[in-house]
Image (spheres, rainbow, N blue to C red):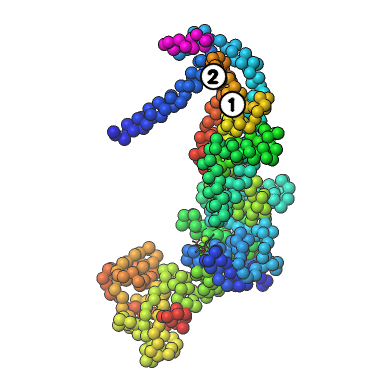
């Protein structure tokens, strides 16, 4: 294969993979608009013959989606707030100081990333039960999910901080600033893009959080949309178009946010803090 | 003169590495002091210790009579120009200049007025609204200078501020920095590994090696009376030539090893002693019959104003101001004024 063919070949592979991933999304939207009989038609239709947009409003009301979505936003917002505030400080320390303890700390942070939520949920449940956190199940989920999101955030933001030259901070110290002042007026503005991007990714991940919420939150009025969705899926669930409508309402805001912000996200992840 | 910066017995350890060893140095108010030495000798470490960016392991340091141990950089009232300039990338030139003023509670209007003044003296007036990334290297350098001079610090610290500029600009900035220093009546400590910069700019030169001050003094004193072989070889360009030899019976000449010739001395030295004779390339004079020794030429390089002749092994160099028709392979006779021969102990390297 010649050199000029390689990028085309790779592009086609990438597009094919994207199609495999995006097709279900398309199918979700299409199915939500179909009637029950058309859904199982063979051969399948790729565009609904008789679209029924009213299903969205109907599902919205019938499945108490405002409550579910509010809970999702609250949980995702809480996770993001905790992760950004604590993770930024942690990442800064890990970026600026170098010794054995810092290396051990970084290793531990990375280890956390390895542990899957499904393994952690039982011990967490027991622990939360012991300290009475189960009376505040949403808060408990926020804490658990923030702990899960933290390593990813810390590792990425640490890299952002490391791309801010130390001399800038030293110049600020000599110019008359304190360490904290230099952090807020010099380092933080320069690392802002990276932090923002990681915060957005953290929010998106937490918005879809399922395992902790499902296991810890019993009351439907406190459950997020991800758990609400699973309430549909019983052994005898047949209302596929409602399920798909629910899913569409759930993911569309996130999808839109990603499409609008994707330029920034990609450039924030690939470029350094300084240009 | 009063001392502006006083260092007494400064030691600095990085773990097991001893970076500064018993540094004592007094810097007078209004003087321009250059710290020179090869890479890794601890110049930056010493400068950063003065700034308070590194903590010292032992010793005492005072600035303007105030003890500085444990005082953070912001309370030392010094300004520093970094090699990378360290301009704040997210601030305009004006904001870079006024950053320290704003931190010290100077009002906005007054800070802007000061920035305009400083910009005028450093030639930045047109650039105040730009960001650092929109400036050339030389302009960034000026902003870094401007940021240092905008307040009236007790001392200016420079860490190789010119090393990122091209040769012509470097020569120009050398003069500008010195002129600025004189105009402000400032006290400056200037780190460089370029001994020409140190010699031309400074009132006082400190030569360092491996964390130790080898010699300090006025530039020409270092050139005329280097205390050891290292300083002799470091100060002066091209570098001093060294030749092994032995003092003659008479005690006032050096017989060079390998029968290369005899160097006259202006004083009496213990006969028979092994020595290392040091001769600066620019002090050698072409001679005919009365030549002290002879040299075979390997390379001839001419800059127009001077001709550099180098021996085939590259170990010996001389500089002539006249043009020459000599070529590789020719042999020339050379003499030297006896007072310009430096003698060093071959073992210790100390001046004899
Ligand atoms: N943070 C550090 N940890 C350990 N060793 C260090 C540290 N900083 C500097 N050193 C060592 O201290 C010595 C002096 O370093 P310094 O930066 O002062 O050299 P320098 O004279 O400024 O050299 P250059 O001309 O290359 O800038 C070097 O050998 C260096 O390896
Ligand atoms: Mg240095």
Q: Is residue A41 magenta?
A: yes
Residue A31 appears in view: yes
Please determine whether, in this image, residue B336 is positioned above or below residue B138: below
Quadrant in which residue A206 is drawn:
top right
Choose between A139 and B87: the one closer to the eye.
A139
Is residue B114 something that shows in the picture? no
User: Which element carries disc 1, helix, strand or loop?
Assistant: helix
- Using residue B117 as the reference point, say whether residue A102 is left or right of it: left
Q: Residue A235 carries which label?
A: 2
Q: How crowded is mark 2: few (under 14 residues within 10 Å), some or many (20 or more)?
A: few
Q: Nearer the viewer, residue B308 or A175?
A: A175
**Sooner in the amino-acid sequence: mark 1 or mark 2:** 1
Q: Which quadrant is home to the N terminus of chain A?
A: top left
Q: Which chain carries label 2?
A: A
- The mark lying in front, picked from 1 and 2, is 2
Magenta: predominant secondary structure element?
loop
Asked which secondary structure carries label 2, the reply is loop
Q: Which residue is drawn at 57% across and 55% down?
A: A101
Q: Residue A208, relative to residue A244: is it above or below?
A: below
User: Is residue B120 shown above or below A72?
Assistant: below
Mark 1 and mark 2: Cα distance apart in space:
18 Å
B65 vs B119: above or below = below
Q: Residue at x 51, y 57 (%)?
A: B162
Residue A87 - label: none
Residue located 31% across and 75% down the image: B295
Q: Residue at x 61, y 65 (%)?
A: B56
Instruction: Tell me residue B148's x, y (percent).
Output: 62, 55
**In screen coordinates, is B323 left or right of B92?**
left
Q: Give the residue number, with chain letter if any, for mark 1.
A: A226
Q: What stretch is highlighted in magenta?
A: A34-45
Label 1 marks a residue whose chain is A
Residue B40 picture location, percent across and down: 49, 64
């Amino acid at each position: 294969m010649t050199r000029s063919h390689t990028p085309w070949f790779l592009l086609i592979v990438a597009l094919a993979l994207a199609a495999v991933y995006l097709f279900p999304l398309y199918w979700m939207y299409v199915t939500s608009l179909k009637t029950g009989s058309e859904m199982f038609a063979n051969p399948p239709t790729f565009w609904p013959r008789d679209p029924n947009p009213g299903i969205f409003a109907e599902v919205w009301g019938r499945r108490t989606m405002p409550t579910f979505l509010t809970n999702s936003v609250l949980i995702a917002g809480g996770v993001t707030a905790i992760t950004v505030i604590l993770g930024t400080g942690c990442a800064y320390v890990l970026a600026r100081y170098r010794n054995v303890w810092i290396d051990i700390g970084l290793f531990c942070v990375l280890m956390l990333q390895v542990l899957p939520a499904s393994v952690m949920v039982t011990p967490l449940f027991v622990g939360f039960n012991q300290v009475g956190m189960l009376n505040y199940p949403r808060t408990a989920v926020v804490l658990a999910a923030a702990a899960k999101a933290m390593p990813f955030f810390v590792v990425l933001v640490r890299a952002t901080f490391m791309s801010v030259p130390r001399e800038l901070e030293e110049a600020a110290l000599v110019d008359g600033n304190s360490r904290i002042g230099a952090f807020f007026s010099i380092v933080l503005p320069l690392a802002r893009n990276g932090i923002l991007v990681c915060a957005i990714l953290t929010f998106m991940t937490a918005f879809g959080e399922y395992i902790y919420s499902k296991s810890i939150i019993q009351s439907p009025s406190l459950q997020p949309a991800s758990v609400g969705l699973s309430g549909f899926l019983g052994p005898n669930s047949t209302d596929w178009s409602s399920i798909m409508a629910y899913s569409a309402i759930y993911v569309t805001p996130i999808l839109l946010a990603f499409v609008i912000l994707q330029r920034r996200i990609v450039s924030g992840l690939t470029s350094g803090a300084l240009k | 003169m009063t001392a502006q910066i006083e260092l007494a017995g400064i030691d600095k350890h990085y773990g097991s590495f001893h970076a500064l060893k018993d540094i004592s140095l007094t810097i007078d108010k209004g003087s321009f002091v250059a710290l020179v030495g090869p890479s890794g000798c601890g110049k930056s470490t010493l400068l950063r210790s003065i700034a308070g960016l590194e903590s010292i392991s032992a010793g005492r340091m005072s600035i303007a009579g105030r003890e500085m141990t444990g005082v953070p950089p912001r309370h030392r009232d010094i300004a520093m120009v970094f090699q990378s300039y360290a301009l704040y990338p997210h601030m305009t030139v004006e904001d870079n200049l006024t950053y320290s003023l704003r931190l010290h509670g100077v009002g906005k209007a007054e800070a802007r007025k000061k920035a305009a003044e400083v910009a005028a003296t450093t030639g930045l007036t047109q650039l105040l609204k730009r960001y650092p990334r929109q400036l050339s290297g030389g302009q960034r350098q000026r902003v870094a200078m401007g940021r240092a001079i905008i307040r009236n610090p007790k001392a200016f610290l420079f860490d190789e501020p010119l090393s990122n500029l091209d040769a012509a600009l470097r020569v120009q900035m050398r003069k500008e920095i010195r002129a600025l220093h004189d105009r402000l009546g400032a006290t400056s400590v200037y780190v460089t590994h370029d001994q020409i910069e140190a010699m031309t700019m400074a009132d006082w030169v400190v030569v360092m090696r491996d964390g130790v001050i080898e010699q300090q003094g006025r530039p020409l004193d270092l050139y005329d009376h280097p205390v050891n072989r290292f300083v002799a070889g470091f100060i002066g360009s091209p570098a001093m030539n060294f030749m092994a030899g032995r003092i003659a019976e008479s005690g006032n000449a050096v017989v060079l090893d390998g029968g290369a010739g005899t160097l006259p001395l202006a004083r009496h030295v213990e006969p028979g002693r092994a020595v290392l004779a040091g001769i600066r390339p620019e002090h050698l004079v072409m001679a005919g019959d009365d030549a002290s020794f002879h040299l075979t030429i390997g390379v001839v390089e001419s800059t127009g104003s001077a001709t550099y002749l180098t021996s085939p092994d590259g170990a010996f160099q001389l500089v002539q101001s006249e043009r020459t028709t000599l070529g590789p392979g020719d042999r020339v006779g050379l003499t030297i004024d006896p007072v310009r021969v430096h003698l060093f102990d071959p073992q210790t390297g100390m001046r004899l």
